[in-house]
Image (cartoon, grey):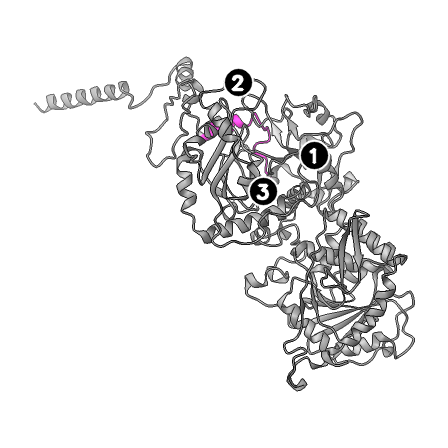
Amino acid sequence: MQAKKRYFILLSAGACLVLLFYFGGAQLPASGRNRHDRSRHGYRSDQPWPHFSDPLHQFLPWDQPDTEEYNIHISPRQKRDVNTSVYKGKRCRMDSCFDFSRCKKNDFKVYVYPQQKGEKISESYQNILSTIEGSRFYTSDPGQACLFVLSLDTLDRDQLSPQYVHNLKTKVQNLPLWNNGRNHLIFNLYSGTWPDYTEDLGFDIGQAMLAKASISTENFRPNFDVSIPLFSKEHPRTGGERGFLKYNSIPPFRKYMLVFKGKRYLTGIGSDTRNALYHVHNQEDVVLLTTCKHGKDWQKHKDARCDKDNAEYDKYDYREMLHNSTFCLVPRGRRLGSFRFLEALQAACVPVMLSNGWELPFSEIINWNTAAVIGDERLLLQIPSTVRSIHQDKILALRQQTQFLWEAYFSSLEKIVLTTLEIIQDRVLQQESRSSVMWNSHPGGLFALPQYSAYLGDFPFYYATLGIKPHSKFTAVIHAVTPLVSQSQPILKLLASVAKSQYCAQIIVLWNCDKPLPAKHRWPATTVPVIVIEGENKVMSSRFLPYETIITDAVLSLDEDTVLSTTEVDFAFTVWQSFPERLVGYPARSHFWDSNKERWGYTSKWTNDYSMVLTGAAIYHRYYHFLYTNFLPASLKGMVDQLANCEDILMNFLVSAVTKLPPIKVTQKKQYKETMMGQVITFCNPTNSVLFARQTCMNKFASWFGGMPLVHSQMRLDPVLFKDQVSILRKKYRDIERL
């Protein structure tokens, strides 16, 4: 009986195994044809049961037929494999496809290939090359280069575009320094063409890095490629307009809550979101307008809504909407990027991104959560309620950040190119790379050079953020150009007055005189160290070199014939401690636009405003010495040295370009004013060659900066109780009032 039970149990177990095999408990290998057929219909033997925690698949567009293309379920690994056909160097990273050894000898230098005769080149790409060639990164020697940029125009790789360069594959491969693209950077705005608009550039980029607009997160190679914004051919090369946020209105609401005005694509890639915008449009505070009226044969393809949309579209002025809306919708077009992105940033209209899979511009360094709302194309109907729920304090912060990012990185083609190069330089020189704070706060990464210091507290811009104060002492730097022949010379009186200041740590005499250095006993005895150093090459720019002997944050820059009392020095320094990022000084000058000559003019007349403080008697942070030496091009510094003039104007240009603020003038003794007045009368003579030289300098500087960075001011800071009818003994800076 027991034997029968055992046989029955074994028979039952065997039957269960057969059933398991039959119903799919264990799959037997299928034929090649079956595998192919099943994969075509999205079936995989190893596909697990779906989890409700998985992200939603993209909705099937209402006007898209049920084709195999939409039915295929592709795994992330399969997507990566497919994308390798777009970029063969898909797996490239800095450590695998970049030769760091080329950058060790000469730091970060960029070589631009010579332009070949007969090769057409667009204006935008020519501006990119000119920007690089005019930057401090440029080298004409390929042996010194760390990075190479093609002279072949790669911006527009749409085969239907008139700017498309043919036979680029062969031309690139024939370049002697190509080396399979290693250490090369390729700029691109448009890739692919109708109808699929892929990201294929039409030639093998090898191991080259891409600075590309509208790049997808799938094709973007992190910390190797650089995502750049899509900009128009009218985008200014240098300078650029400032943002449109003139003042902070509180609460920060405008006439419209959310706006958009642009093309509507009836079919094809990029049509889904724009076709659905009419569901959200309410003609009141949410105004989303589209038009079918674009392209040669738009009437052949128009749908039932086209005429109504076109009529509504013509009722609104785009600029008026842009400047009077709190949020601006930025949906994708045929490609992921859109011109609307930069337009919204400049207008202080918070961008609401609707472009799934777009790697946002400069995403490696910019925290876009502080300046934009990142939406989802699949959740379009939730966008109005989402933006309405954002608190007004957050809206104000978002708008302010749009203005900072626009002016720091996007207002000109030059800034876009230089930001790209600075990002790559940070990767190459990792020990000297910028922090996120430097990139995402004023004045931005282009003006905060990490080669100066890795500590934020060494820069004048971050004291408030860190909750610290600058050093309580200053270093005086006296620029000496005449020989020391008498003990009654102004430089010796100046040295004695400065040394008596309670805030003076040391005095540096920069000897730019052709005569030999005076003996030590010729200098007066002081309570602070006096260091005499010989100027490098005896040129004007040497007064702004970042000397290691300057040990304090503050630098008091003085000409040898400056007349200042100890009280004046003390007061100016206490003012500077409250404004450490700005120039603080005494003699002021101004600029103006000469409409007759259509150029900038320079004046030293006493007027009700000023825009410069001369560095013959001014206090500023020592970081500006480093920035003057390492940021400004050799052409401007060479001009200053050749003329032996204008170094003070150039320093004012630099500081105002960084801070976007005017310098600060402090009050002077009447005696000093009278002394300067005599110089003014002579200097204002139109035939004066010095005045002509300074005006020439000003226009040359404005051209390089892409505009006039100087800012006018009518503010002068005086001591409390200055000129008040109280006892002189009650005044802290009483000597300033004495004749």
Pick the front one: 388 or 9: 388
Q: How many angstroms separate mark 2 from mark 3 (CA)? A: 39 Å
Taking the spot 67% from the left edge, 32% from the top edge, the residue there is 181
Q: Quadrant of the C terminus?
A: bottom right
- At label 2, the amino acid type is Gln
Q: Is residue 677 above or below residue 319?
A: below
The residue mark sitting in front, 3 or 1, is 1
Pick the front one: 472 or 388: 388
- The residue beneath circle 3 is 362
Residue 564 point in image, percent of width and height: 77, 75
- Tag of residue 299: 2
Mark yes or no: residue 520 visible. Answer: yes
Is residue 82 on the magenta stretch?
Answer: yes
Q: Is residue 510 left or right of residue 103?
A: right
- At label 3, the amino acid type is Phe
> Which residues are the magenta region?
76-93
- The residue beneath circle 1 is 124
Is residue 551 on the magenta stretch?
Answer: no
- In what element is the residue under mark 2? helix
